[in-house]
Image (cartoon, rainbow, N blue to C red):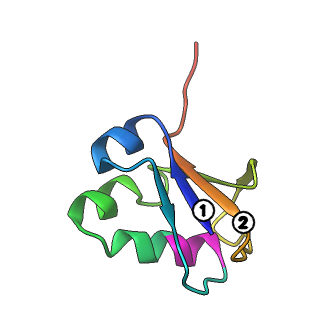
Amino acid sequence: MKVLFFAQLREVLDCHTLDIQAQLNSVADLRAQLQQKGELWQEYLAEGKALAAVNQTLATEDTTITASDEVAFFPPVTGG
């Protein structure tokens, strides 16, 4: 699966994209695996600090993912 990072996440994690070969069942599983990469990953990918989209549709932690999906992580956006 292709994993993309946007905005501040891309800058802080120094990562634009990853290809993940592991069999994962949900966004929560993917997030947990990525958080194992270190402290910055744990902090910036914590639930509530980074939103997820699967195939360009906003996703929840329970959203099912497959090896052919594109998953993007991005910070919550506020506007005025």
The N terminus sits in image quarter: bottom right
Q: Residues within 10 Å of mark 1 (few under 14, many from 20)?
A: some
- Residue 2's label in the rendered image is 1
Q: Quadrant of residue 45?
A: bottom left
Residue bearing the label numbered 2 = 69
Q: Residue 54 at what x, y percent from top left?
A: 71, 58
* Picture quarter with the C terminus: top right
At 40% from the left and 43% from the top, the residue drawn is: 10
Is 45 or 10 nearer to us in this picture? Answer: 10
Q: Nearer the viewer, residue 21 or 35?
A: 21
* Above or below: residue 61 compared with residue 59: below
Residue 8 vertical position relative to residue 18 in the rendered view, above or below: above
Tell me if residue 41 is in the magenta stretch.
Answer: no
Disc 2, SS: loop
Q: Which residues are magenta?
A: 26-30
- Whether label 1 touches label 2, CB < 8 Å: yes
Dividing the picture into quadrants, the one containing residue 7 is top left
